[in-house]
């Protein structure tokens, strides 16, 4: 059984074109078989009717030479008597009056004629012998004794015609099946050519994240539906690629600060011999930076997975004040910028996880300290349903022409300002805030300096 299945599987075409061609060929073969059988059956019946009609006409001609008006049956002699007597038997009752010269008494044909004549009615039958013969009887009523005329006809020419028709129909079937298979392969190949082209294009476009799409115009309904499905798939692939690039850029941006701290501490430690206390302090800074890197990776990767699986899921809650205090300890050199925190309460519960809140706040605090001239103020307060955090600096502010591009990834107002930012911090902060139902916005009316506002759902 398994071998038969494997053999059948090997014989089954692997391509859709081959399978459709095989289905069309099988269907056509079944249909032509039925039509051929029906056609030949009808032709056999028609040829038999022709033979019976010929026999009845001959019998009717013979009955004109048989006289049954008297007490005895008489066969009248005519000019064409020899032609009429060919393959003709005449019976008076059950007594044989005349028979063909070639007929022998006791032969199978003679016995079949005797049985047919004994039935005394319009009856036809076929005697199968060396050559098939069709027999028909024609009764002739009489005043005293009735007569019966039996005529015979060789069926060999009719059978030869039927065999010729069968052979011709089989040859025609073979030609039609061959044409059906070839035309089906051509038609299916032509129909599938646009599908193959669309598949190749979709493969190329998905590899490079192209903006090209198939659309649904100027296409048949089936190809339009396929194009719409491929367009939706390409859109999802492009979204994934953009999200992957965004996540890579965000990780690079966020990991840059702790990596810089590690490099600076190692350079400082290797510059000259250090005491054990200084070495332990350096190790503690490096360990803290490494923990920060791990937290950054876990936060961004967890956010990416959470967004992919549950875009609207609610995060945990955390106290805002300790997170702000911890971040302000590491925002920048305290001798250049005065960073102060203003809060209305000691406890402000926000509906975000601590690590995620740090990632939202860190880019805004880093930018404020980077561009401030002397002062940065961070204020936090609770409003109905939200916790609002304002980050205000007294720096040059944001150019008015750049406000519309402020939160677009990779955009910077001035690439030659001496800072090594990549333009990813603010887009990351806004994306993470929106992921938990919050928002990061810029106040264009703040002067001097810049004001960024973070709105986080209250815990």
Image (cartoon, grey):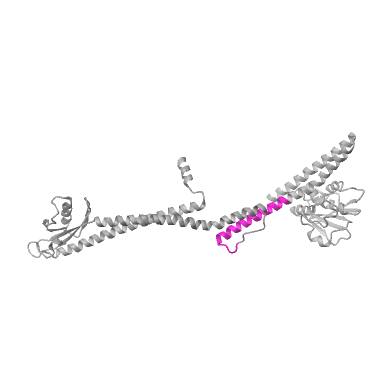
Seen at 40% across and 54% down, the residue is: 30
Along the viewing direction, whichever of 383 and 305 lies nearer the viewer: 305
Q: Farthest top residue?
A: 276
Along the viewing direction, whichever of 69 and 74 lies nearer the viewer: 74
Residue 220, position as x, y percentages in the image: 55, 62
Q: Is residue 353 left or right of residue 31?
A: right
Total labels: the figure holds 0
- Is residue 32 on the magenta stretch? no
Residue 297 visible? The answer is yes
Residue 39, position as x, y percentages in the image: 34, 58
From the viewer's perspective, is residue 307 above or below residue 279?
Answer: below
Q: Is residue 110 left or right of residue 456?
A: left
Q: Is residue 64 left or right of residue 386?
A: left
Instruction: Assign the magenta stretch its main secondary structure.
Output: helix
Q: Which residues are magenta?
A: 216-245
* Figure quadrant of residue 28: bottom left
Residue 457 visible? The answer is no
Seen at 49% across and 51% down, the residue is: 19
Where does the N terminus fall, quadrant-wise?
A: top left
Residue 322, position as x, y percentages in the image: 84, 47
Along the viewing direction, whichever of 421 and 178 lies nearer the viewer: 178
- Is residue 222 on the magenta stretch? yes
Seen at 33% across and 55% down, the residue is: 167
Q: Farthest right residue?
A: 335
Residue 80, position as x, y percentages in the image: 13, 64
């Amino acid at each position: 059984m398994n071998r038969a299945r494997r053999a059948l599987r090997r014989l089954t075409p692997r391509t859709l074109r081959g399978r459709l061609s095989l289905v069309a060929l099988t269907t056509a073969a079944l249909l032509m078989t039925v039509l051929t059988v029906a056609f030949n059956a009808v032709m056999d019946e028609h040829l038999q009717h022709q033979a019976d009609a010929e026999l009845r006409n001959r019998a009717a001609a013979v009955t004109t030479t048989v006289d049954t008006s008297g007490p005895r049956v008489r066969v009248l002699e005519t000019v064409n008597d020899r032609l009429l007597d060919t393959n003709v038997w005449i019976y008076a009752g059950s007594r044989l009056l005349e028979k063909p010269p070639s007929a022998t008494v006791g032969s199978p044909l003679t016995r079949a004629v005797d049985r047919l004549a004994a039935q005394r009615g319009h009856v036809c039958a076929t005697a199968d012998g060396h050559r098939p013969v069709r027999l028909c009887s024609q009764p002739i009523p009489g005043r005293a004794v009735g007569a019966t005329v039996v005529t015979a006809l060789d069926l060999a020419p009719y059978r030869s015609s039927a065999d010729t028709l069968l052979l011709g129909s089989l040859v025609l079937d073979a030609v039609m099946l061959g044409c059906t298979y070839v035309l089906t392969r051509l038609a299916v190949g032509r129909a599938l050519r646009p599908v193959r082209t669309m598949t190749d294009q979709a493969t190329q476009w998905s590899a490079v994240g192209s903006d090209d799409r198939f659309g649904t115009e100027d296409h048949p309904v089936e190809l339009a539906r396929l194009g719409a499905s491929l367009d939706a798939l390409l859109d999802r692939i492009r979204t994934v690629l953009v999200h992957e690039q965004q996540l890579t850029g965000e990780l690079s941006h966020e990991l840059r600060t702790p990596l810089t701290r590690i490099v600076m501490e190692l350079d400082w430690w290797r510059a000259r011999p250090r005491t054990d206390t200084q070495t332990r302090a350096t190790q503690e800074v490096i360990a803290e930076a490494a923990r920060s890197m791990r937290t950054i990776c876990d936060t961004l990767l967890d956010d990416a997975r959470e967004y992919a699986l549950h875009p609207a899921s609610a995060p945990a809650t955390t106290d805002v004040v300790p997170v702000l205090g911890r971040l302000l300890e590491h925002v920048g050199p305290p001798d250049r910028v005065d960073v102060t925190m203003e809060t209305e309460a000691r406890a402000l519960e926000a509906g975000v996880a601590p690590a995620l809140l740090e990632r939202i706040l860190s880019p805004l605090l880093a930018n404020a300290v980077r561009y401030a001239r002397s002062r940065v103020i961070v204020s936090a307060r609770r409003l109905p349903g939200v916790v609002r955090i304002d980050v205000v600096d007294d720096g040059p502010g944001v150019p008015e022409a750049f406000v519309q591009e402020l939160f677009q990834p990779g955009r910077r107002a001035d690439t030659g300002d001496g800072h090594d930012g990549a333009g990813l911090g603010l887009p990351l902060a806004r994306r993470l805030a929106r992921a938990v139902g919050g928002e990061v916005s810029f106040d264009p009316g703040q002067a001097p300096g810049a004001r960024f506002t973070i709105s986080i759902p209250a815990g």
